[in-house]
Amino acid sequence: MAEAHPVGFQWVMEAKKRGAKVFHVDPRFTRTSALADTYLPIRAGTDIALLGGVVRYILDNELDFREYVLAYTNAANIVSERFADTEDLDGLFSGYNPDTGSYDHASWQYEGQEDNAKVRGTGKERDSASGLEHESHGEPVPAQAPRDETLQHPRCVYQILKRHFSRYTPEMVARVCGIPEEKFLELARAWTENSGRERTGALVYSVGWTQHSVGVQYIRTGSIIQTLLGNMGRPGGGILALRGHASIQGSTDIPTLFNLLPGYLPMPHHADHPTFDRWVDSIRHPGQKGFWGNSRAFAASLLKAYWGDAATPENDFCYGYMPRMTGDHGTYQQVLNMIDGKVKGYFLLGQNPAVGSAHGRAQRLGMANLDWLVVRDLFMIESATFWKNGPEVATGEIVPEECRTEVFFLPAASHVEKEGTFTQTQRLLQWREKAVDPPGDARSELWFFYHLGRVLREKLAGSTERRDRALLDLAWDYPTHGPHAEPSAEAVLKEINGYEVATGRPLNAFGEARDDGSTAIGCWIYSGVYADGVNQAARRRSRHEQDWVAAEWGWAWPANRRTLYNRASADPEGRPWSERKKYVWWDPDAGEWTGYDVPDFEKTKPPSYRPPEGASGPAALAGDDPFVMQGDGKAWLYAPSGVLDGPLPTHYEPAESPMRNPLYGQQANPTRKIYEHPINRMNPSPPEPHSQVFPYVFTVSRLTEHHTAGGMSRTVPRLAELQPEMFVEVSPELAGEVGLAHLGWAHLISGRAVIEARVLVTDRLTPLRVDGRIIHQVWLPYHFGTEGLVTGDSANDLFGITLDPNVLIQESKVGTCDIRPGRRPTGPPLLDLVGDYQRRAGMTPDRKIPLVTTDAAGGDDAAGSTDEQSPAAHQDGEPHA
Amino acid sequence: MGLKTFIQGWPVYRQLTGTDPLGRGAAAQSARSAALTARTETADGMARSVCPYCAVGCGQRVFHSDGKVTQIEGDPDSPISRGRLCPKGSASKSLVTSPLRQTKVRYRRPYATEWEDLDLDVALDMIADRILAARAETWEDVDDEGRPLNRTLGISSLGGATLDNEENYLIKKLFTAMGALQIENQARI
């Protein structure tokens, strides 16, 4: 955090000054470690084993915040007797279908509900990364689940959790992660001692956690700990994701993602959502508890914002215009399709996949096989010059005179040359004022897309093609100003906020959304950002003039709420758990919830409220159900639905690992998304032979002085000077073993690429003793490429493409490699070197990656799966039945 | 210069007699420092902005004169950053004024070995033509069972996460209306 989010880290230091103990877990000792009380080195890719150890420590010593756990979680819920755990099935859960590499969730349900839940195979959910829909709400679950408030029933969630994590002992943590037992116990003791009624502890992660084939389950494990300890919805608690880009939260909320629409509404799927009603019901789940009951109004209002006057209740608000998903259309699938010649044109908007995405060579070869490419950026980045300066030009794989891709480079406006909002990592929108005009041809994306739409519509005017109706009927009338006819960002923000169609009055909250076409809302969760006709994101009341919650600085979604689920900061009766930790509470005299923050609860629903029989929607949530966006108002220790790779987290080895999984016969995540494309050869891992060809573990992260793919830092003189060169950091022990000299050169080889780097020998990396052997890890920054003031080979070239099944994010924080002294070969001999390693490792083009490595697969529940095809069979995103 | 002025100009004298006994401020100031004016004071204007690098969201004050950015500083009012910026945030002025910034449209013809110039309007028009051609060539109306698809898989997009919410909103809206489904973002990566 001190390295990649230095200014945010000041708050950790403030906490430390007030007595907080700071623990830092990282494969490499960094500036964060230097300022922490305790540093725990870890083998990259083993965080679930560490956190699972903490879960076991809590449960074994009964250190959970029992009152909170009983009242606010599903600990007491009883699970189906058909459920079988990884402890029973050698690393698989019940319901696994080896043909599809995915789970049927029927046996994971609560008792008596195996048949009414969404009981189908989940290959389709994986392909559409449906896990992302849960950013703002949980999966549906039936309202009435059987419970045992004594937590003694052998199939209640609490007992299942206990059995599931029983083998995650301090010895096992040491064996898997390489963390000494005493250090692990120090962490577990401090965490639990600092949680409960009087105290809260925070878990902070950087989003490298998401870049694993089990990334979602890392975060699930953290949430189990924080829920057991009563640290959710309370001040000083929580799980805090340190996201890496100025508006990456905004890019998910108002997504430019293939599977989502604004506000986490799903992009329609051709088979599941043929009609507006089917689409809406898949979101709101009729009869369901909770706040999604009103999603018909959110959906109708979005389509109304898109298609304006043309969208009417009679024509289902132009739902028929929406494009439909048929499978995986994610960025990695797209790149493989580019290589296969299926994609004509590609837009890169402030993004540099030649350096920033996994498997750089695949990225560049894909771009070299397009009809046309549009790059919009501040600087001439590697993704614009691959045809000229890329590594494949040196190896002869790309010959400029034979490369047909037509490239348009359009300069972009910087953050000070346009106005608009960023959403930072805690959901806070901050409006930026414009300082100066952009230089020359540089324009904002707002300008480019508004005018592109205008030109497209002009060219299509009079078209009678059915496919052009959606463009011609589009509501695309934004006021412009200035010599370049810049569209008004405030007008767009007003549309995002939503307005009453008849009067144009901005809505004050999403509760005003209607499903009859009388409201238009671009992103319902942002409704309120323009409340009272005021740009709330532009508020800048000084921190000196308001309390520590600072509610009048910017605007946070939803409803300017700074801490989500803050009803949980009060006990079931609505009183603060303690005076020290008071935040939001019930005021019986006023008959409403009050506190420092906007209460995350219906304002006048008393703690004593109990829903009448047969209630649905928000009315079905009791006065002591704080997790209001969850289908049952409870925090889930066990997820009966919604997480595709298991109801509980389980340690699996990374897709590329030098080690056999010490816990189960199942080596790696059996539901991970793999692409068996000739360009995407994965290094073998046990139990496959030849894993010793790539004996070392490598991991990558950021330098303080550089930013992601380097386009905004290797181009800036001061930053380039501070970190001028690509390097690999190695321990003295590994340097001795391989013969690497400090400040000399080394090259690293994977089954995809060879890269070179200067050698930095430090004791910030340490060999780890795991499972009776020594594992060496090396560390690389991933910022370098061929353009800019300082250049170097790209670390991401080393990675192959394997994705988390829930969100389709790549595993790019851990892989295996070999490392050798000296510089890499250049030209065609470089390809020969990779080819040599591939041969030695048995990485033939026809090799099948073994998803299942235990004989325990199968069971009754697998047979009933409705998933028809193997994951490799729908690689190309073509329709499948 | 008289003796009195000479003695009073001596920092130790000022330190002993003035309001700055520790000699860290006014007492140590030279005539040259006293004559300096911060460029933030003479700026034409100041925009309240936000750092474009990581997601902490530190407040920035962007000072400008004659249409040029002259200084970028941390915003002391911000409850998030309390006026601080990290090495990257502190270098934001160098970012936006970097001599490496591209300010002209560049165009690479198929099979060409060099860039050439192109007018922005022409580029926009050419891109629109290519979108329409790619759509026409790869359009999918319905699936095998006659269910609507309304899409093209011939167009892809990958956006960075320094795009504004308003920009992402228009991008998604326009691409969705043109049937381009394969719209992705750094948020996937």
Image (cartoon, coloured by chain):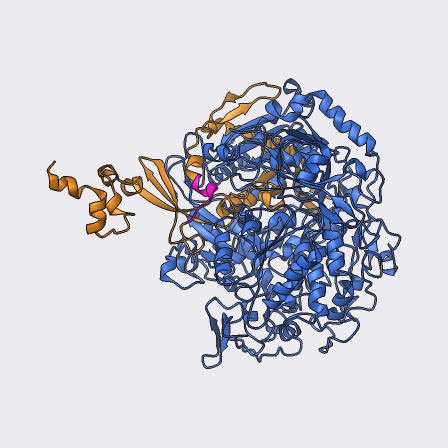
Chain colours: A blue, B orange
The answer to whether one can see residue A791 in this image is yes
Which percent across, then down, holds residue A331? 65, 40
Looking at the image, which is closer to me, A280 or A149? A149
Tell me the residue at 82%/34% (across/down).
Answer: A841
Looking at the image, which is closer to me, A246 or A798? A798
The answer to whether residue A326 is left or right of residue A297 is right
Which percent across, then down, holds residue A393? 65, 22
The answer to whether residue A367 is left or right of residue B128 is right
The answer to whether one can see residue A116 in this image is no
Which percent across, then down, holds residue B41? 28, 43
Tell me the residue at 13%/41% (across/down).
Answer: B5
Residue farthest toward the left in the current orientation of the protein: B2
The magenta stretch spans residue A728: no
Residue bounds of the magenta highlight: B84-91
The magenta stretch spans residue B87: yes
Tell me the residue at 70%/31% (across/down).
Answer: A739
Which percent across, then down, holds residue A204? 58, 56
Look at the picture and state if B153 lies above or below A191: above
Look at the picture and state if A519 lies above or below A26: below
Q: How many marks?
A: 0
